[in-house]
Image (spheres, rainbow, N blue to C red):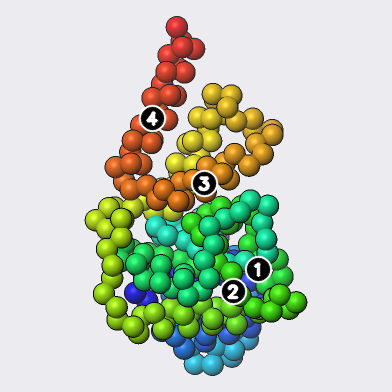
Amino acid sequence: MMNNIRIVLVNTSHPGNIGAVARAMKNMSVERLYLVSPQCFPSAEATARASGADDVLANAVICDTLDEALADCHFVVGTSDRNRSLSWPALEPRECADRLRLETQQGEVAIVFGREHSGMSNEELERCHYLMQIPCNPLFSSLNLAAAVQVVCYELWMTARQSVPVVEGEEDGRELVNQGEMESYYAHLERTLIDLNFLDPQHPKLLMRRMRRLFGRARPDRQEMNILRGMLSAVEGKKLYKRGS
């Protein structure tokens, strides 16, 4: 289970927080750390705060974009303590750990943590299948980054220790599409909808965000994705034929 889980930190501003996260992860046997455009890393302060989890820092994968960090993941959970204008399927940490125990049987999964002061943007959340919120005091709900990671990794560790046989889900046996392939599909879909005048790129509103939410729930497999991409290509071909006739 743990080998297929990655913790992704987006645009972390303080290197000490990266080190503290590495320590929290290793405490709970989660050791795969991805850093998206960290403002200061490598850093002696990160190493000092890691307190012995130096190997987690040494093996951290540094990415330029969130899409790069998630490209080969088939299931992604984003974290936030803010309400969003468009509701997103939500999990609490314990529910999330149970779900990830199933999802890791299929391959790579990721839990994404945003910036210390502003969290994840709506555009970044669009890359996620679920939103996770940690229940805490509503009058003082802001956890620091390492504390949030510790809570989540603790629940993962406790779930892994239970050694409960995995229940076969409806995705069992299906080759699910990874996040990189989904992003390619969303770009194709958006181009086609614009070409059909169904989507106005100057006034897109929430259409693509709602489409992402729909397909995030559906979790298409490879055969289904081939059908979806084939439909879009057929529409594009028909439009080209009409223009040429």
**Could you classify mark 3 by the number of other residues whose Cα lies within 10 Å: few (under 14), some (14-19), or many (20 or more)?**
some
Residue 39 at least partly seen: no
* Left or right: residue 64 compared with residue 224: right
Q: Which residue sits furthest top?
A: 245
Distance (Cα) linking label 2 and label 4: 40 Å
- Measured as percent of width and height from the top left, residue 29 is found at 41, 84
Q: Which residue is mark 3?
A: 212
Q: Residue at x 53, y 35 (%)?
A: 190
Q: CA distance from mark 3 to mark 1?
A: 21 Å
Identity, as a three-letter code, of the amino acid under mark 2: Ile
Q: For mark 2, give the secondary structure.
A: loop
Whichever of labels 4 and 3 marks the residue nearer the N terminus, that label is 3
Q: Pointer 2: what residue?
A: 134
Q: Which residue: 33% across, 35% down?
A: 227
Percent position of residue 70, x then y: 46, 59
Tell me where residue 66 sits by quadrant. Answer: bottom right
Q: Amino acid at mark 1?
A: Asp
Foreground disc of the pair 1, 4:
1
Q: Amino acid at mark 3?
A: Arg
Residue 12 location (% of width, % of height)? 63, 71
Q: Is residue 222 left or right of residue 140?
A: left
Q: Is residue 95 above or below residue 204?
A: below
Earlier-in-chain disc, 1 versus 4: 1
Res 81 label: 1
Q: Quadrant of the C terminus?
A: top left
Dot 4 corresponds to which residue? Answer: 231
Q: Which mark is residue 160?
A: none
Q: Is residue 52 above or below residue 192?
A: below
Labels 4 & 3 near each other (Cβ < 8 A): no
- Spatial CA distance of label 1 from label 4 is 38 Å
Q: Residue at coordinates 63% horizontally, 51% vertically from top-left?
A: 86
